């Protein structure tokens, strides 16, 4: 069976930008200088068929106007990873227009593409519309604080259970073996026990809804995840980009 592997090949400069697949974020970055790389997006492709792609270009953190040099360009590349990475095709090329008016607050782009994948992920499809949830922010804060306490108290196996559904989806969509999937958690565990300290959620963190209002995260003002660890010696940060949702029929947030 073929293993189609979709990536976004992008470059950006002088802007904060976000790219979503099916209204789910695959990259959010504050690119004060030029940056370019490729990122996998299979985990945001829940099943074969039509996929939406949207992009937003905003001022860099701390600014209110787009820089004249603000730019985002990308394309989608398809590989077959059945036997190593074999390039198949490239499509969906996009390049933002030059900024003529610095007072324009944001540049937006939306499109769609067809994807062929051999899996169907059990993700946020059964999620509750969070705009209809009373005290949604308070419930999300509780979910974040629960994770923080687990890591602070060294209850890593409990944390592993909470992210099991997310990791299973990652394994399916990225075609990971059981050993490779377990290796993902072992790498994270090494950071937990290696001296990095989990930080409290900043008071000014903002709640952002994704996936047609079925998932939620907290973000710092610079766009980074509000759940993160810091190495006290080097001040290096490790962000935990986890997403929460409330399954229909339930009342509390779970990790997806």
Image: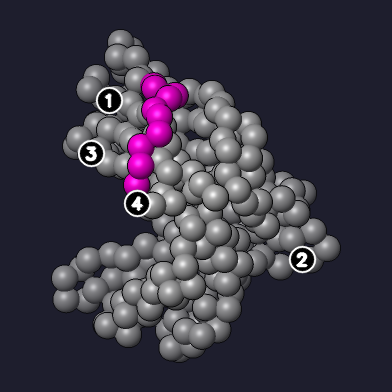
Front residue of 209/221: it is 209
Secondary element at image label 4: loop
Q: Quadrant of residue 14?
A: top left
Q: What residue is shown at x 35% (from left), y 29% (from top)?
A: 74
Q: Which residues are magenta?
A: 85-94
Instruction: Say if mark 1 contacts mark 4, CB within 8 Å.
Output: no
Label 3: which residue? 35
- In the depicted structure, whether residue 155 falls above or below residue 41: below
Front residue of 11/238: it is 11
Outermost residue toward the top in this view? 100
Label 4: which residue? 84
Cα distance, mark 2 to mark 1? 42 Å
Instruction: Say if mark 4 contacts mark 2, CB within 8 Å.
Output: no
Cα distance, mark 3 to mark 1? 12 Å
Mark 3 or 1: the one toward you: 3
Measured as percent of width and height from the top left, residue 2 is found at 51, 47
Disc nearer the start of the sequence (3/2): 3
Image position of 114 (left or right of 30): right
Cα distance, mark 1 to mark 4? 36 Å
Secondary element at image label 1: loop
> Does residue 138 appear in the picture of this structure?
no
Q: Quadrant of residue 88?
A: top left
Measured as percent of width and height from the top left, residue 97 is found at 34, 14
Q: Residues within 10 Å of mark 3 (few under 14, many from 20)?
A: some
Q: Residues within 10 Å of mark 2 (few under 14, many from 20)?
A: some
Q: Quadrant of residue 89?
A: top left
Instruction: Say if mark 3 contacts mark 1, CB within 8 Å.
Output: no
């Amino acid at each position: 069976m073929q293993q189609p592997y979709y990536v976004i090949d992008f470059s950006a400069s002088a802007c904060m930008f976000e790219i979503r697949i099916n209204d789910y974020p695959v990259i959010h970055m504050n690119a004060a200088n030029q940056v370019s790389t490729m990122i996998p997006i299979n985990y945001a492709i829940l099943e074969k068929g039509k996929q939406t792609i949207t992009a937003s270009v905003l001022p860099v953190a701390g600014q209110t106007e787009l820089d004249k040099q603000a730019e985002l360009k990308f394309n989608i590349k398809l590989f077959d990873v059945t036997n190593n990475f074999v390039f198949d095709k490239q499509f969906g090329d996009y390049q933002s227009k030059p900024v003529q008016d610095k007072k324009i607050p944001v540049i937006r782009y939306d499109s769609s593409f067809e994807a062929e994948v051999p899996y169907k992920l059990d993700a946020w499809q059964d999620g509750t519309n969070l705009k209809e949830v009373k005290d949604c922010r308070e419930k999300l804060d509780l979910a974040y604080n629960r994770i923080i306490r687990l890591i602070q108290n060294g209850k890593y196996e409990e944390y592993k259970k909470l992210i099991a559904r997310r990791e299973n989806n990652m394994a399916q969509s990225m075609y990971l073996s059981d050993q490779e999937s377990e290796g993902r958690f072992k790498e994270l565990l090494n950071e937990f026990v290696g001296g990095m300290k989990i930080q409290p959620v900043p008071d000014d963190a903002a709640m952002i809804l994704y996936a047609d209002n079925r998932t939620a995260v907290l973000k710092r003002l610079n766009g980074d995840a509000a759940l993160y660890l810091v190495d006290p010696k080097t001040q290096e940060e490790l962000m935990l980009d986890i997403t929460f949702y409330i399954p229909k029929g339930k009342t509390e947030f779970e990790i997806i």
